[in-house]
């Protein structure tokens, strides 16, 4: 009987340990051949990302990483998906302590990473940034494969300028996670344009928070409606928040889109958002490409063979610095006048 109890206790401890990892996990294929592969022969990467529930874009980004960094492709991938800076920093430190060969980071916040990056450098661990930029010195990471969030905001503003809406623009601006590269990049060009144009006005500004919440976006617009504020553009920094804002307009009986009183603008190129643009319910969508894994995989494989990644000098300006180790995803915008079903099929994310 004592032996049986002891076995049960050991089983319970092992089971508890298996469930203790939270959002940290080992990734890769679970096939028999992969299980048999020698762990020592695999390239050990630590991937710090945001949680896939954040948005359709993030779900596609996490999936892209999952599909590339597998045991079949030669990797042992340790993954941490968190939406807050402190959780991400803790995960990155743990990966450094675990002795990963490479550290990959999509940062929840653009600032606060210097200490962790210094730790990685001391440990001889190359760092690759993906999706979002970090405010740090260029020599703190090997390469960044990212979206130019500032250019996304600039493209959106330039599109508005070409529309030249009679009477100008009165914005409800719904920001993403404050301090993230995506929020900073999509906000600054709008602020500059409002300061520049006499007939552009910021009526109300709010944030969807760390999760870019559609419900929070809906509440922001509901508050503006309740206050009888005069607005004619929703500038939402991702598609989910734009949809939440649209629902507030619908419930209040306010027309929106191409032939409506309020224009709606979103970012990311989710299929549901592009369908809204094609139907005329929305006016604009800006692309943010989630696909960076293959580029980083190529860089790592080159380094593993003793080579140096071929990163064209980009002279990319950000945070008061100039970076020559940044690879920018090519990205576009679309509006109702140009969109087609073929475009949605080619570029749309999700279902």
Image (spheres, rainbow, N blue to C red):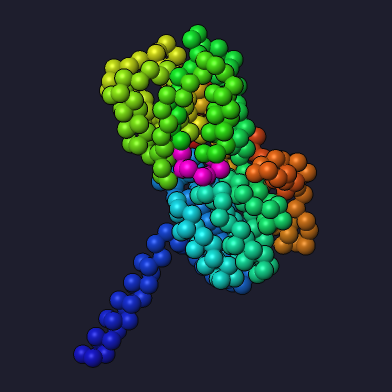
Q: Is residue 131 left or right of residue 172?
A: right
> Could you say which quadrant of the image residue 156 lies in?
top right
**Which is more toward the observer, 150 or 287?**
150
What residue is rendered at 45% in x and 51% in y?
Answer: 83
* Position of residue 128 measured from the top left corner of the image (x, y, whole percent): 64, 54
* Position of residue 316 measured from the top left corner of the image (x, y, whole percent): 71, 40
> Could you say which quadrant of the image residue 221 lies in?
top left
Above or below, 41 relative to 188: below
Quarter of the image with the C terminus in it: top left
> Could you say which quadrant of the image residue 330 lies in?
top right
What residue is rendered at 49% in x and 63% in y?
Answer: 90
* Position of residue 223 measured from the top left corner of the image (x, y, whole percent): 31, 28
Q: Is residue 319 left or right of residue 112?
A: right
What residue is rendered at 48% in x and 33% in y?
Answer: 237
Q: Is residue 110 visible?
A: yes
Above or below, 15 relative to 296: below
**Which is more toward the observer, 164 or 350?**
164
Specify start and end residues of the magenta stretch as a single range.
Answer: 176-182
* Position of residue 343 measured from the top left corner of the image (x, y, whole percent): 55, 25
């Amino acid at each position: 009987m004592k032996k049986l109890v002891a076995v049960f206790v050991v089983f319970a401890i092992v089971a508890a340990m298996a469930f203790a990892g939270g959002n940290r996990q080992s990734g890769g294929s679970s096939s028999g051949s992969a299980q048999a592969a020698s762990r020592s022969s695999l390239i050990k990467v630590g991937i710090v990302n945001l949680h896939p529930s954040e948005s359709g874009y993030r779900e596609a980004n996490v999936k892209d990483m999952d599909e590339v960094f597998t045991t079949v492709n030669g990797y042992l991938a340790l993954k941490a998906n968190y939406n807050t800076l402190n959780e991400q920093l803790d995960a990155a430190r743990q990966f450094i302590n675990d002795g990963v060969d490479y550290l990959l980071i999509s940062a929840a916040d653009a600032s606060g990473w210097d200490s962790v990056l210094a730790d990685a450098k001391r440990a001889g661990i190359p760092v690759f940034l993906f999706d979002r930029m970090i405010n740090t010195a260029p020599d703190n990471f090997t390469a960044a494969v990212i979206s130019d969030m500032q250019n996304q905001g600039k493209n959106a503003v330039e599109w508005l300028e070409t529309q030249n809406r009679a009477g100008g623009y009165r914005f409800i601006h719904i920001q993403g996670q404050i301090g993230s590269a995506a929020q900073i990049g999509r906000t600054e060009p709008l602020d500059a344009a409002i300061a520049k144009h006499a007939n552009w006005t910021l009526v109300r500004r709010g944030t969807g928070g760390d999760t870019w919440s559609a419900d929070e976006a809906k509440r922001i617009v509901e508050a503006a409606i309740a206050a009888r504020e005069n607005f004619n553009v929703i500038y939402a920094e991702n598609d989910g928040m734009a949809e939440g804002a649209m629902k507030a307009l619908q419930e209040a009986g306010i027309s929106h889109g191409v032939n409506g009183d309020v224009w709606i603008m979103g970012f990311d190129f989710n299929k549901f958002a592009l369908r809204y643009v094609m139907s005329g319910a929305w006016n604009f969508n800006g692309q943010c490409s989630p696909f960076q894994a293959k580029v980083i995989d190529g860089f790592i494989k080159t380094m593993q063979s003793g080579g140096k990644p071929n990163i064209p000098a980009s002279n990319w300006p950000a945070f008061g610095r100039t970076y020559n180790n940044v690879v920018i995803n090519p990205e576009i915008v679309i509006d109702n006048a140009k969109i087609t079903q073929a475009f949605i099929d080619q570029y749309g994310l999700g279902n």
